[in-house]
Amino acid sequence: MADTEKPLLVKRYASRRLYNTETSDYVTLEEIARVIRSGREVQIIDLKTGDDLTRQYLLQIIAEHESRGENVLPLGVLTDLVRSYTTQAQSVVPQFLAMSFEMLRDGQTKMVDNLTNVPHPMAAMPGMEAMQRQQRAFLKSMMGGEWPDTDASDPEESEAQRREAREAREDLDEIKRQLAELQQKLGELNKPSK
């Protein structure tokens, strides 16, 4: 197994400093977050007790991002998470969240694979290029504008790209609406029964 397939082991010293065992240097939470965003798993253990502190530090990374205004988790979701710790839904929520993120991750991977695997068997089909441009525009809007191969400098496509971006935003709004409905239903499940 390659080193990058194993979790990066980070040790927390008594001074609360975090030590990267692979590079033999101290790391910050932001550096750990970068490793995680690159796709690598991380395990953080307390050097003295051997306790696994990974969950605690992952929550701290999320809290720091949220406090800087990088709001990923809607207030309703955070509220429902807090409620889930004191209700019977506690056992359902982690499974629900894990399945939801797994579906999101799989969907994103499949979309990126479909767009980047060239030549596509259906590439000769009429309208396929337009559909791929629309998918790229949608993904670009989903990823905050970070999508390669979208050439906005082509004047012939500028109107089509604007239309595709508008449609992608509408699709994203619909997804947000559906997520809000799910949050509301989850909140109703978490309400204590009288």
Image (cartoon, helix red, strand yellow):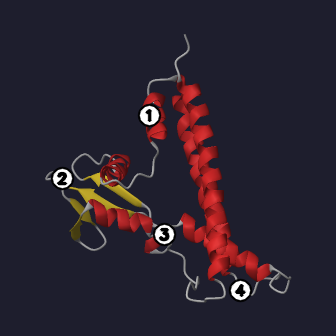
Find out whether the residues at labels 3 and 4 contact each other: C-beta distance under 8 Å: no
Q: Is residue 133 above or below residue 119?
A: above
Tell me the element at label 4.
loop
Of the numbered discs in the image, which one, if any, rests on residue 41?
none
Tell me the element at label 2.
loop
Of the numbered discs 2 and 3, the one sitting upstream in the chain is 3
Q: Please name the amino acid that badge 3 sits on.
A: Glu
Q: Is residue 164 above or below residue 179?
A: below
Which numbered disc, 2 or 1, marks the residue closer to the eye?
Answer: 1
Label 1 sits on residue: 79
Q: Can you give x and y, in whole percent of width and height, for residue 19 in the image?
A: 23, 63
Along the viewing direction, whichever of 70 and 116 lies nearer the viewer: 70
Label 4 sits on residue: 118
Q: Please identify the residue farthest to the right as the structure is shown.
A: 125
Q: Is the residue marked by circle 3 packed among few (<14), some (14-19), or many (20+) residues within 10 Å?
A: few
Q: Please name the amino acid that badge 4 sits on.
A: Val
**Picture quadrant of residue 187:** top right
Which numbered disc, 1 or 3, marks the residue closer to the eye?
Answer: 1
Determine the CA span between mark 2 and mark 3.
26 Å
Determine the CA span between mark 2 and mark 1.
29 Å
Q: Would you say 94 lies left or right of 28 here?
A: right
Which numbered disc, 4 or 1, marks the residue closer to the eye?
Answer: 1
Q: Is residue 117 above or below residue 36?
A: below
Of the numbered discs in the image, which one, if any, rests on residue 5?
3
Q: Would you say 114 lies left or right of 9 here?
A: right
Label 2 sits on residue: 16
Determine the CA span between mark 1 and mark 3.
35 Å
**Residue at figure coordinates x 59%, y 49% from the top left:** 176
Q: Please name the amino acid that badge 2 sits on.
A: Arg
Q: Please name the amino acid that badge 1 sits on.
A: Thr
Along the viewing direction, whichever of 21 and 133 lies nearer the viewer: 133
